[in-house]
Image (cartoon, rainbow, N blue to C red):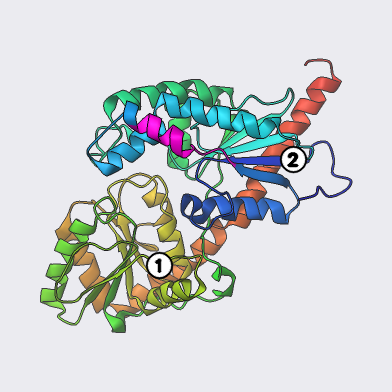
Amino acid sequence: MEMVANQSAASPSILGLSVFGDPFDPRSWSGSARSLFAGLQAHHHLVGAYSVDLTRRQKLVSAVRHPSANRRRLYLNVMKNRLSFRFRSANANQVLQRPQPHYNTVLQLSALFRPRLPAGTLHCSYHDGNTAVSRRSEFTYVKASSSVLGESWENERQFYPGVDLVFTMSEWVRESMISDFHVRPENVIAVGAGPNLSYIGDLENARGGRPDTGTILFVGVDFEGKGGPTLLRAFRRVRLALPAARLRIVGCSPPLSEPGVEVVGALSKSDPRQEARLRALYEEAAIFALPTQFDCFGIAFVEAMYHGLPCLGSSICAVPEIVRDGETGFTLPPADADAWADKMILLLREPARARALGAAGFRQARQRYSWELVTSRMVSAMSAKLEQRAAAVSAGRV
């Protein structure tokens, strides 16, 4: 990855660091790592991207220190504890000690480590959430152990104020960075996120939902956490009113055997045939519904909007930023199965309205959520910060 010639001193030359495995693996961070770094690379701002994830031994040591019988809690404990933070920081330092092309900016995904950067290097980070929002009492879904959340809070409390630019996917998390971690508002920028589908450029026109199919689509890897049980209860009511309605569950495989329910299971976006199957499921659906219990952003909603589907989402976290209530779909209390059933019945019975909401969602997704926009916003902010730094040096203030 060579730098283009004649870049100005204020043009960021970025070294990327990720904790989610190979940065260019479509499975890393639900594909967002790959989309982000590929976008920066396409515009010649990325000089390299590396994983600083825990080794197998480091994961084992962290798991032994913070055990849990609950698999999700164990995963979160290993992700967020202080020892894992130190391990990843050491891994990052090893990466930075290797011979690298010239870079003047480091962009890391998450606050799960802190590297030692060469003097004068711009330090930036990108986040979908933080510990402050995930520890809030109103979110009752599985969290890390309280002791680990305390360690994570201290790690982040020290991390964010020391970063030059903090990028967030949502305004919701941006506000938390300012209010909970006291980051200067000018240093926190909500840049959004985009869809992680290889064919997204082919979606030139909104097809709109297809109410004639009567199909409700759920896409999520965690049936419980994404509100699957609420949706299932709601769907039973939908079937009483509309016996031909169907519910398709994609991304997970809950052991269900109910009339009208089809469990498709996981589909890999890195497999062309499986991604084509996913596309067909979106295009055959009438409604996209995800009663998520906790979602700092919700890229699944963005991808559904790109397919012209009216979206039903939870009225929590950053979801209302994406799904505009009454404009591109509806936002509902995540545990209110009756409210979800009412809206699904409404949209299936009023196809013109469903298509209008889906078309509005498609327009909004293209205008607000793309990786081209994300990388453009990041590079613009980085360039401005580098210019400020260069001016300060020139004036002798640094």
| Residue 255 picture location, percent across and down | 19, 64
Q: Is residue 130 visible?
A: no
Q: Is residue 329 left or right of residue 24?
A: left
**Could you give the CA–CA distance between mark 1 and mark 2, rounded to whole angstroms?**
36 Å
Q: Residue at x 57, y 54 (%)?
A: 34
Residue of label 1: 267
What's under tag 2, amino acid-wise? Pro
What's under tag 1, amino acid-wise? Leu
Residue of label 2: 12
Looking at the image, which is closer to me, 89 or 329?
Answer: 89
Looking at the image, which is closer to me, 200 or 144?
Answer: 144
Dot 1 crowding, Cα within 10 Å, few <14, some 14–19, many 20+: some
| Residue 262 picture location, percent across and down | 24, 74
Q: Secondary structure at mark 2?
A: loop
**Disc number lying in front (1 or 2):** 1
Q: Quadrant of residue 266?
A: bottom left
Q: Is residue 190 above or below residue 385?
A: below
Q: Is residue 364 above or below residue 280?
A: above
Q: Main secondary structure of the magenta part?
A: helix
Q: Residue at x 34, y 76 (%)?
A: 285
Q: Is residue 106 left or right of residue 65?
A: right
Looking at the image, which is closer to me, 287 or 105?
Answer: 105
Q: Quick check: is 29 in the magenta stretch?
A: no
Dot 2 crowding, Cα within 10 Å, few <14, some 14–19, many 20+: many
Query: Which region shows up in magenta?
Result: 51-63
